Amino acid sequence: MRSRGRRHVLQALGLAPLACAAGARAGARVTIRLSHVVAQRTPKGLALEHFRARVQALSQGAIQVLLYPNSQLYGDEDEMLALQLGAVDMLAPSLSKFGAVGFPEFELFDLPFLFDSSEQVRRTQQGAVGQELLALLARQSLVGLGYLDNGFKHMSANRPLRAPEDFVGLRVRIQSSRVIAHQMRALGARPVVLSFGETSRALVARVVDGTENPVSNFWTQGMHQAQTDLSLTSHGYLGYCIVAHQRFWDYLQPGDRALIEQALAEALAWGNTIAQRENDAALAALRASGATRIHLLDAVQRQRLRHATRGVHEALALRIGPQWLRRMHGATSSL
Ligand code: LMR
């Protein structure tokens, strides 16, 4: 029902995109509709709220950002189409979701055990590789406006996941990334692509047995109510790319574009400083709830998982583009 409802909205808005936005708030000269799939009390939810507030302050109310969190307007399956049609103006999908819409290069960031720290991620994103990846988005008339962290992902199920053999036979919800699918198969699990907004219900209904995400998403989606065990594997990174459609970007006056860029740069920098803290707070809340057992992995256990998934880097090289892989490995090893 939710998904049919969204599609209906998509069709309606797709016919008259900017006209609807213009009238959305009295007093605002420009309105930016920004849809995303996570809860407000997450690194992404908070950073986008910061963006909204900075745009409001810098433009003295002349530009307004309307936020639609928690898949309430669009979910993974239709948000990119909504952007292409102009039914929304900006999105903040995870980097993992760009592969399925024609940018397999972005699946670089999904490679298991590629990064050891957020500092490595940051340097990669701000360096040549990260900036050239953003420029690729022009292939589909998208404007890549910047990166935002969530953090490192962990694995959950109704059993501890500390060793490769623990994964065998599990159906695990994943994002639409071939790299993540391959990672799960390498561990003996069956990857099941599901939209983020459906994941908690799928866990409750036992359509899937487990999933992976940073703790902030696990906690705010209530996944702990359906998973008895969370294993702190830190096996991969989850981050976001903020995108607009070129048509919308061109429609803005140059001064407004500069203001929006400034507000976004401030919000992303701020968001990257609070992401770890939010994940730590979610972990503390999860611990206090007592709902889910939390398992720490030691260095030997992590090394076994790393070893079991290391073939993913080579197996997916052709899809991602070997030159990107080489440059990424070069960039991370020189840090
Ligand atoms: C997921 O689908 O698991 C995440 O990408 C959700 C998000 O945007 O953090």
Image (spheres, helix red, strand yellow):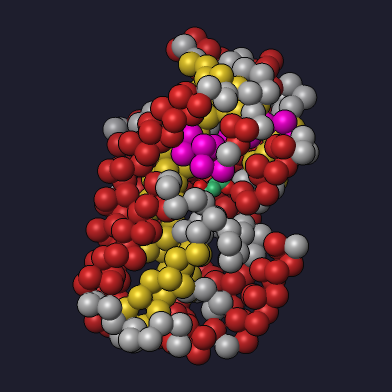
Q: Is residue 124 left or right of residue 192?
A: left
The answer to whether residue 126 is above or below residue 259 is above
> Does the rendering let one see residue 34?
yes
Residue 159: image quadrant is: top right
Q: Quadrant of the C terminus?
A: top left
Name the residue at the front extreme.
Answer: 289
- Residue sitting at x 60%, y 36%: 223
Q: Residue 51 at what x, y percent from top left?
A: 32, 62
**Nearer to us in this view, 248 or 58:** 58
The answer to whether residue 302 is above or below residue 208 is above
Residue 334: image quadrant is: top left
- Residue sitting at x 59%, y 72%: 82
Q: Residue 24 at what x, y percent from top left?
A: 45, 82
- The span picked out in magenta is 208-221
> Does the rendering let one see residue 234?
no
Residue 218 included in the magenta stretch of the image: yes
**Nearer to us in this view, 290 or 230:** 290
How many numbered badges does the structure rendering display?
Answer: 0
Q: Residue 36 at what x, y percent from top left?
A: 51, 59
Residue 244: image quadrant is: bottom left
Q: Residue 109 at what x, y percent from top left?
A: 48, 43
Q: Is residue 22 left or right of residue 230?
A: left
- Residue sitting at x 35%, y 75%: 64
- Residue sitting at x 34%, y 65%: 52
Q: Quadrant of the N terminus?
A: bottom right
Residue 84 included in the magenta stretch of the image: no
Q: Is residue 101 left or right of residue 119?
A: right
